[in-house]
Amino acid sequence: MDVKYDEIFSSLRYKIKSLISMYEDQKSKVNDLEKKNLQLRQQAVELEDKLNELDKKYENLKIAKVLSSVPGEDVHDTKLQVNRIVREIDKCIALLNR
């Protein structure tokens, strides 16, 4: 009878070691995936920032194109109007910051 119990215990030890090994492997994979997830999230934030920057540049280019297509004296008047609007916006921002 002792031999049978020894075989059962031996088998049980082997199975427990296998389970522990599989657990460690899965734990390692989870850690790797969490690191990859963090990297991808950081990359997404960086790409979103770059997209916002490019959108601003595009809007500036559109404004520059409109201003450059205005003929002769209208360019001067348009620039004055834009400067007046910018000053008004600056005043509004100053009031909001109080």
Image (cartoon, rainbow, N blue to C red):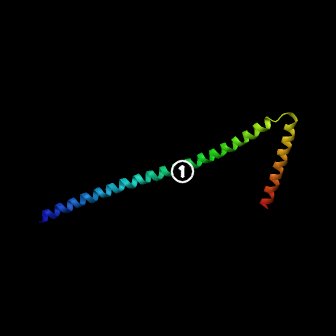
SS at mark 1 in the image: helix
Q: Position of residue 14 (x, y in %)?
A: 24, 57
Q: Residue at 86% of width from left, 33% of height from top?
A: 72
Which picture quadrant has residue 96? bottom right
The vertical placement of 17 against 51, above or below, is: below
Q: Residue at 20% of width from left, 62% of height from top?
A: 9
Locate the C terminus by quadrant.
Answer: bottom right
**Amino acid type, residue under disc 1 in the picture:** Arg
Q: Residue at 73% of width from left, 39% of height from top?
A: 62
Locate the N terminus by quadrant.
Answer: bottom left
Which picture quadrant has residue 57? top right
Q: Position of residue 4 (x, y in %)?
A: 14, 63
Viewer-closest of 94 and 7? 94
The vertical placement of 8 against 65, above or below, is: below
Q: Position of residue 26 (x, y in %)?
A: 37, 54
Relative side of 25 to 85, left or right: left
Viewer-closest of 35 and 85? 85
Q: Residue at 83% of width from left, 52% of height from top?
A: 88
Report the residue marked by disc 1.
Answer: 41
Relative side of 56 to 23, left or right: right
- Label count reads 1
Label 1, residues with CA under 10 Å away: few <14, some 14-19, many ≥20: few
Residue extending furthest toward the left: 1
Q: Position of residue 51 (x, y in %)?
A: 63, 44
